[in-house]
Image (spheres, rainbow, N blue to C red):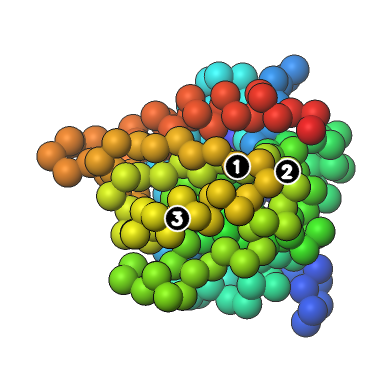
Amino acid sequence: MTVREVRIPVALTKGDAEVSGLWSGVDAADATVALAHGAGAGMTHPFLEGLAAALVDDGFSVLRFVFPYVESGRRMPGPAAHAVATWAGVQAWLAAEGVESFVAAGKSYGGRMASLATAAGSLTPAGLVYLGYPLHPPGRPDKPRAEHLPSIVVPQLFIEGENDPFIDPRAQFDEVVATCRDARVEWIAAANHSFEVKGKRQSAQEIGARLAEPVGAFTRAVRGH
């Protein structure tokens, strides 16, 4: 996999900034996936490395990137507005590369920020992929993060572990998905929020690579949306 380090301009309220990205541009790519990290890991996490490599092997171009708080060396996410602006910057960067249609995907926090950016109109992807949507903090179903999802018009794919505490109870998650205009769920049997399965020894890179199949199938289905 050929990877090029890039810089992505981001317009923040406090002034212009840049974030780091990794671009795997494939000649005559089938489609493009923009891939965001979760709250506790950057773009080089083995899970994203495995997923990106498998997608590239399958003929997709992939752009990974970090949010401003990671660029600044902080561990805790900054304001949601900064993440929304970053997704807008990613879209502008792809457009400058000649990519007009792409799918926005993200692990947990990164996917939720893509959904916020899309609902706000700052991001216009062909579709959204959530790699473990964090519906609420574990044990706090009274704090759902879903009020914006029904306003999203592009197709949404939720890839979810059956044992993910971020979507427990399942009935609440099912109700949220039912409010979406065009959404489907890909269940990963017995998996947790990191898509690990108890008793099954797999590296994070292998786990990420396995998710390339549903991500790729969805991306092909919605390209040009």
Q: Residue at x 77, y 63 (%)?
A: 120
Q: Residue furthest bottom?
A: 14
The reply to whether residue 4 is in sight is no
Q: Is residue 175 visible?
A: yes
Residue 4 found in image quarter? top right
Taking depth in this image into account, of 79 and 9 the one nearest to the observer is: 79
Q: Is residue 63 left or right of residue 74?
A: right
In the rendered structure, which amino acid carries the disc numbered 1?
Ala
The amino acid at mark 2 is Val
Q: Residues within 10 Å of mark 3 (few under 14, many from 20)?
A: some
Q: Which residue is mark 3?
A: 173
Q: CA distance from mark 3 to mark 1?
A: 12 Å
Q: Image quadrant for the C terminus? A: top right
The answer to which of 153 and 65 lies nearer the viewer is 153
Q: Earlier in the sequence, mark 3 or mark 1?
A: 3
Badge 2 crowding class, 10 Å Cα cut-off, few under 14, some 14 to 19, many 20 or more, is some
Q: For marks 2 and 1, give the one nearer the viewer.
A: 1
For the N terminus, give its image quadrant.
top right
Residue sitting at x 79%, y 42%: 94
Q: Which residue is drawn at the image coordinates 57% and 27% (left, top)?
A: 216
- State yes or no: discs 3 and 1 in contact (Cβ < 8 Å): no
Report how far apart the C-alphas of labels 2 and 3 lie in the structure: 19 Å
Q: Position of residue 175 (x, y in %)?
A: 50, 55
Label 2 secondary element = loop
Pick whichever, 101 or 18, lies toward us: 101
Mark 1 element type: strand
Question: Which residue is tagged 1?
Answer: 183
